[in-house]
Amino acid sequence: MSLIAYPIASDAYDMLAFLKAGPKEPWPQRAVREKEAEARAEARVTFVTQAVGPLYESRDEALNAYKGLVVDDRKDHAFTPAAEDRFCTLVCRPRDALRGKPKAIKPVFSEGERWPKAKAPIATVWQLSLSYWKIMTVAQVKAAGLTPVGQARHLRKKANGKDLTPEEIAALSQSPLLAARPQKALDFGLFDFPLPENPAIIIADE
């Protein structure tokens, strides 16, 4: 059985725009496991599931909007994505997010009932949920106490004159400027020599 190959991206909204545009080719970089994703992105990644895009009043509206991306079990529109492409799903959530802690319900002991009658059903909406490997920024990597993966010079070498992918450009812009190795002591030139009275000073013999 095939495993889901999750996209590697720095932002879910860019991914959504790419998917809704109906590209002829799949998302450029995808991976099943974290190590594979980090090797391809040459950066630290974290697995994220994020709700993005517009809100829809009904499930049918959402299914019509994301036709060909999510599982559709309707009789006349049945569709099931390939196993490796099931990183999109629809979620149902309250229209108005609750702010703060919910109020505790107090018993009323009225008319033979202990608890008050339930209010009207909560209004809900449907939204697309994307699961993907999110490329971590330098600040996020440092905050998590992780070691950066890859450097900008690796991306430049990997390009070999070809255009970088959006993920590689994002990693390039976020990579810290680190030396590839500790700097070595400078070699003497052909006509350089240390002063006899002070070997720490190098002068040119020309």
Image (cartoon, helix red, strand yellow):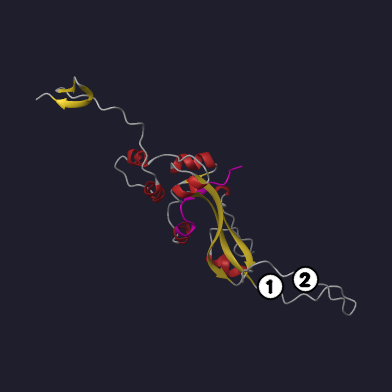
The type of residue carrying mark 2 is: Ile
Residue designated by label 1: 122
Q: Is residue 198 above or below residue 96?
A: above
Query: As rendered, which of 7 and 45 lies closer to the eye?
Result: 45
Quadrant in which the C terminus appears: top left
Residue 61, given in percent of the width and then of the height, sits at 57, 70
Residue designated by label 2: 105
Circle 2 Cα neighbour tier, 10 Å, few/some/many (<14 / 14–19 / ≥20): few
Cα gap from disc 1 to disc 2, whole angstroms: 16 Å
Task: Residue at 43% x, 56% y: name it.
Answer: 23
The stretch in magenta equals 1-14
Circle 1 Cα neighbour tier, 10 Å, few/some/many (<14 / 14–19 / ≥20): few
Task: Residue at 11% x, 23% y: name it.
Answer: 205
Of circles 1 and 2, the one toward us is 2
Query: Secondary structure under badge 2?
Result: loop
> Residue 122 lies in what quarter of the image?
bottom right
Q: Is residue 184 above or below residue 51?
A: above
Residue 199, given in percent of the width and then of the height, sits at 23, 22
Residue occupying the far top of the picture: 196
Task: Residue at 35% x, 36% y: name it.
Answer: 179
Tell me, yes or no, if residue 46 can be seen here.
yes
Query: As rendered, which of 51 and 77 lies closer to the eye?
Result: 51
Q: Would residue 8 be counted in the magenta stretch? A: yes
Tell me, yes or no, if residue 137 can be seen here.
no
